[in-house]
Image (cartoon, grey):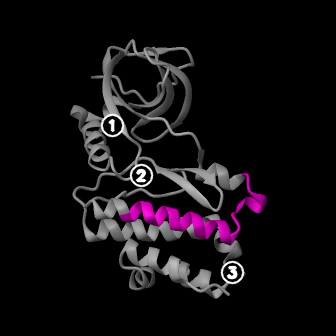
Amino acid sequence: MKSIINEFNFHPGRVLANKYEVISKLGNGWEGEVYKVRELNTDIERAAKVFYPNRNLKNKSVIFYAKKLHALRDCPVVIQYYAQETIIYKRLPVTLLISEYVEGDILSEYQKRQRGNRLPVFQAVHLLHALTVGIESIHHMGEYHGDLHSDNVIIRRLGLSFELKLLDFFHWGRATKSNRQEDICNLIRIFYDVIGGKEQYSKHSDEVKYICSGLKRSLILRKFPTASDLRVHLETQAWS
């Protein structure tokens, strides 16, 4: 019976595939762990997602990610894919997916540093708009994200707006209307959460409540059946 690997915990300084020096661990998820690495030949910083072999049978997860990132390479919110490498760990082949390293904050951590652990509505609307524009571009390419939440968004604050990158696309098969609708509902959920969630909801304006719709899926999708509809609403809404 093959060993099951549930963690790597590579330390800074370790060299992977004779090409990439580990700088720090960025996070981990169900499929594997993500590291900030330095490409030895160029000194360029990259990100390396290291997949647990038992969650990447026949390299299917890596192939899915690589193809999806490549297909969406022209979408500005999508991290750029570069290459894949194989290392041997505990006598098992382990695949690394090498991609663009993005400076910024995970949205959930950024939110925790804000006063009251929430964003002012003005900022949150700009954040929602930036997210919606990004998801709209993905949907126009015939794809979807599938796992939008505040731990899968990297943000950089740029004046009034936000520069974003999205992490960890989820694979539910081919893109469908239902997949895209789930993305839209998750956009609204992120907005709802960053402005304080249930605790603050009753204090918000009618304009905010119109967008959040009490998180009722049917009501959200009646108002915003596509990401484009949500974007247009945000761009034309008159705020009191």
Q: Main secondary structure of the magenta part?
A: helix
Foreground label between 2 and 1: 2
Q: CA distance from mark 2 to mark 1?
A: 28 Å
The reply to whether the magenta stretch includes residue 124 is yes
Q: What residue sits 67% from the left and 71% below the top?
A: 122
Where does label 1 land, which residue?
55
203 lies above or below 104: below
Q: Secondary structure at mark 3?
A: loop
Horizontal arrangement in the rendering, residue 28 relative to residue 62 (left or right): right
| Label annotation for residue 76 | 2
Where does label 3 land, which residue?
204
Residue 168 on image: x %, y %: 41, 47
Q: Secondary structure at mark 2?
A: loop
Which part of the image, by quadrant, shows the C terminus? bottom right
In the rendered structure, which amino acid carries the disc numbered 3?
His
Q: What residue sits 63% from the left and 87% below the top?
A: 206
Q: How many marks?
A: 3
What is the magenta range? 113-136
Foreground label between 2 and 3: 2
